[in-house]
């Protein structure tokens, strides 16, 4: 998989639905063969597929490489704005 080197922010690269590289990864929250949940700079990301395997997790570079067959990638939440329930109610 030929991918540009380290970049700022977050990037997602998918090759043939079988190889996935995500930059800007802070942590892997949970994973199994069909599901990987990561904490990224832009919120938690859910990755679904079949036979998913973590090929490489590099905390220094903040990147994650996965192999398998990917069905979807989605964000579970947006980046936190710092507003809590009271801020939203009492504008």
Image: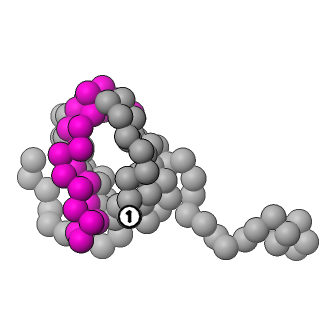
Say which quarter of the image contains residue 35: top left
Indicate left or right for 83 with 37 as reference: right
> Relative to residue 54, is residue 24 depicted above or below?
below
Q: Which of these two is toward me, 9 or 86?
A: 86
x and y, in percent, of residue 53 in the image = 23, 37
> Is residue 44 something that shows in the picture?
yes
Q: What residue is at 43 percent from the left and 65 percent from the top?
A: 41
Q: Is residue 59 magenta?
A: yes
Provide residue 59's location: percent of width, then percent of height: 27, 66
Q: Which residue is found at the position 85% from the left and 69% from the top?
A: 86
User: Residue at 26% of width from left, 27% of height from top?
Assistant: 51
Q: Position of residue 87 (x, y in %)?
A: 82, 72
- Dividing the picture into quadrants, the one containing residue 68 is top left
Name the dominant secondary structure of the magenta segment: strand
Q: Secondary structure at mark 1?
A: strand
Q: Which residue is mark 1?
A: 26
**Given the current orientation, which residue lies at the most extreme top position?**
50
Q: How is the image coloured?
A: one colour
Q: Which residues are magenta?
A: 48-71
Q: Is residue 52 magenta?
A: yes
Q: Does residue 71 appear in this view?
A: no
Q: Is residue 48 above or below residue 75?
A: above
| Left-right relation of 74 to 15 | right
Image quadrant assignment for residue 83: bottom right
Q: Residue at x 89, y 66 (%)?
A: 89
Front residue of 43 and 36: 36
- 71 left or right of 63 in image: right
């Amino acid at each position: 998989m030929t991918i540009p080197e380290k970049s700022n922010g977050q990037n997602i690269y998918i090759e043939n639905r079988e190889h996935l590289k995500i930059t800007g990864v802070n942590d892997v929250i949970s994973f199994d063969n069909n599901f990987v949940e990561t904490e990224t700079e832009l919120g938690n990301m859910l990755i679904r597929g079949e036979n998913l395997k973590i090929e490489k997790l590099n905390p220094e570079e903040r990147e994650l490489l996965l192999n398998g067959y990917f069905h979807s990638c989605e964000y579970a939440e947006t980046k936190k704005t710092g507003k809590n329930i009271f801020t939203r109610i009492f504008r």
